[in-house]
Image (spheres, rainbow, N blue to C red):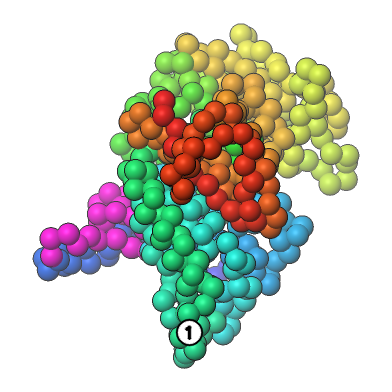
């Protein structure tokens, strides 16, 4: 087991295996508990847990130990006293949609065991403000929009003793009715109107591909950690601001082409660790017509985290059609590095692979400055009926927006609705009906424009044209296809 060392200088390959051990032993213990519970549960009882945990293969745990997966959703963490939401760029409480995307990858129809109902905080940390009027419904509908078919608010009464006396529930210490209770009642009324939404499927325009090996590697390798979280955050931001929803898909040992083939576009931002089986699956996806988008720092490690003595991006080279002979972090001593893509500037932040396009590979964008100005920053390689785009940098909301536009998946709901960036748009579909959620995270009213006549499920009336969503307001529309 890793032990404390100077500057966290643990052998990274030992550290990676330690995380794998943590996951294995945790799942084994969870399985022991589940087997005991199964002996005594009544018909209709289900086995679950509450929360997404780090250093655990949550997909394997759900598959082997649980009947359904549940999550604890606390979007008000975004407004905690330990951060400045006015200057943050992670979209604050809207960021919990990113977490819910992860949950949905584990279990498409999940539950919320703890949906925030009051201000959070222990006596030792996590101080935060009370949710503003409207936010309890907004955050609960955020969970529903992203796949939750069950909502449980935490908690009913606020504790009067112990560590969590500031982890407020629906009712406060005095046990009197209050505005939070009225808002939970209002959510209940609206939730009952959404019975048809239950078991409907989330509609995604593209997929973000991940795997636990690379996720855990970011925790033991600061170079990997510099690029992967940034790219995932920015892909999420671009998705939200362009109203282009996505699914998270984890590569597992039993992953098949059918798990990927339904997505016209897949981002696999920084597959640092790769093996032949995963490369073959990616190749099959592309050959059948998919578009695979890969960023910098790809393919230079094996599954033990050891660097391979191959030209980068290693065994992915036959897919990308590129050779990486040089690479660097962008230097804080130089001007911001960017690339030129046609008439547009393309952001290339954090880290830059200097790409050489091999035979048959097209160069789409070229770096404009630093010592590698004039070299390829973005390439496109046709493979079978599909293509692979290789971006020699991390992803930003600007370059992701451009890639979504280029691949033709951007703003899939634009024929139905116009909405400002402050509003999140999510669609769930079942049979011949689709259900469009419009969620306003702005503390002021905003206008949306419905381009066709739809049914407002809250009021059971028709809606068309300009609609005003109040501060933190929500709407759910039924659309027949």
Residue found at the very far bottom of the displayed protein: 161
Residue 190's x, y, as percent?
Answer: 43, 55
Q: Residue at x 42, y 34 (%)?
A: 434
Question: Looking at the rendering, which quadrant does residue 263 occupy?
Answer: top left
* Residue named by callout 1: 176
84 sits to left or right of 117: right
Residue 169 placement (x, y as % from top left): 48, 76
Label 1: how many residues lie within 10 Å, few (<14), some (14-19) or many (20+)? few
Q: Is residue 374 above or below residue 101?
A: above
Q: Residue at x 26, y 56 (%)?
A: 66
Left or right? Give the position of 112 relative to 78.
left
Indicate yes or no whether the magenta region holds residue 287: no
Query: Relative to 466, is 60 above or below?
Result: below
Instruction: Please give the range of residues in magenta.
Output: 42-70
Describe residue 283's horizontal placement relative to residue 108 as left or right.
Answer: right
Q: Quadrant of residue 93?
A: bottom right
Q: Is residue 213 visible?
A: no
Q: Residue furthest top?
A: 360
Between 252 and 453, the one nearer to me in the picture:
453
Quarter containing the C terminus: top left
Q: Which quadrant does the N terminus fall into?
A: bottom left
Q: In the rendered image of this protein, does residue 117 appear above or below residue 63?
A: below
Question: Residue at coordinates 39% horizontally, 50% vertically from top-left?
Answer: 193
Q: Position of residue 402 (x, y in %)?
A: 69, 27
């Amino acid at each position: 087991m890793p032990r404390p060392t100077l500057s966290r200088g643990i052998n990274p390959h030992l550290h990676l295996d330690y995380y794998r051990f943590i996951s294995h032993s945790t799942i084994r213990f969870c399985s022991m508990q589940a087997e005991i519970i199964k002996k005594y549960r009544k018909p209709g009882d289900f086995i679950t847990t509450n929360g997404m945990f780090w250093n655990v293969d949550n997909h394997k745990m759900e598959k082997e130990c649980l009947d359904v997966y549940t999550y604890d959703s606390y979007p008000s963490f975004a407004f905690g006293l330990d951060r400045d939401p006015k200057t943050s760029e992670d979209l604050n409480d809207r960021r919990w949609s990113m977490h819910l995307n992860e949950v949905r990858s584990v279990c498409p129809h999940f539950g919320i065991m703890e949906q925030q109902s009051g201000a959070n905080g222990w006596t030792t940390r996590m101080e935060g403000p009370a949710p503003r009027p409207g936010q309890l419904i907004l955050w609960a509908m955020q969970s529903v929009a992203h796949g939750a078919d069950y909502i449980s608010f935490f908690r009913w009464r606020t504790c009067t003793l112990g560590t969590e006396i500031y982890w407020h529930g629906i009712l406060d210490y005095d046990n009197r009715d209050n505005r939070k209770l009225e808002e939970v009642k209002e959510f209940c009324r609206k939730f009952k109107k959404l019975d048809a939404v239950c078991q409907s499927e989330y509609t995604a325009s593209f997929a973000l591909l991940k795997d636990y090996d690379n996720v855990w590697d970011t925790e033991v390798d600061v170079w990997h950690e510099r690029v992967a979280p940034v790219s995932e955050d920015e892909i999420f931001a671009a998705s939200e601001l362009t109203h282009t929803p996505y699914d998270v898909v984890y590569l597992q040992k039993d992953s098949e082409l059918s798990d990927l083939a339904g997505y016209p576009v897949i981002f696999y931002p920084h597959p640092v660790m790769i093996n032949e089986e995963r490369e073959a699956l990616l190749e099959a996806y592309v050959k059948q017509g998919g578009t695979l988008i890969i960023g910098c720092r790809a393919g230079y490690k094996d599954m033990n985290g050891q660097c391979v003595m191959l030209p980068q991006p290693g065994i992915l080279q036959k897919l990308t059609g590129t050779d990486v002979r040089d690479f660097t972090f962008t230097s804080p001593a130089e001007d911001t590095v960017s690339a030129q893509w046609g008439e547009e500037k393309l952001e290339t932040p954090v880290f830059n692979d200097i790409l050489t396009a091999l035979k048959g590979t097209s160069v789409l964008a070229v770096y404009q400055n630093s010592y590698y100005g004039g070299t390829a920053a973005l390439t496109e390689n046709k493979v079978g009926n599909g293509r692979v785009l290789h971006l020699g940098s991390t992803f930003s909301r600007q370059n992701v927006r451009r890639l979504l536009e280029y691949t033709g998946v951007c703003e899939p709901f634009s024929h139905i609705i116009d909405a400002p960036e402050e509003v999140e748009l999510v669609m769930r579909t079942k049979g011949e009906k689709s259900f469009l959620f419009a969620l306003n995270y702005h503390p002021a009213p905003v206008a949306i424009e419905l381009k066709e006549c739809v049914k407002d499920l809250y009021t059971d009336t028709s809606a068309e044209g300009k609609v005003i969503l109040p501060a933190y307001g929500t709407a759910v529309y039924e659309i027949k296809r």
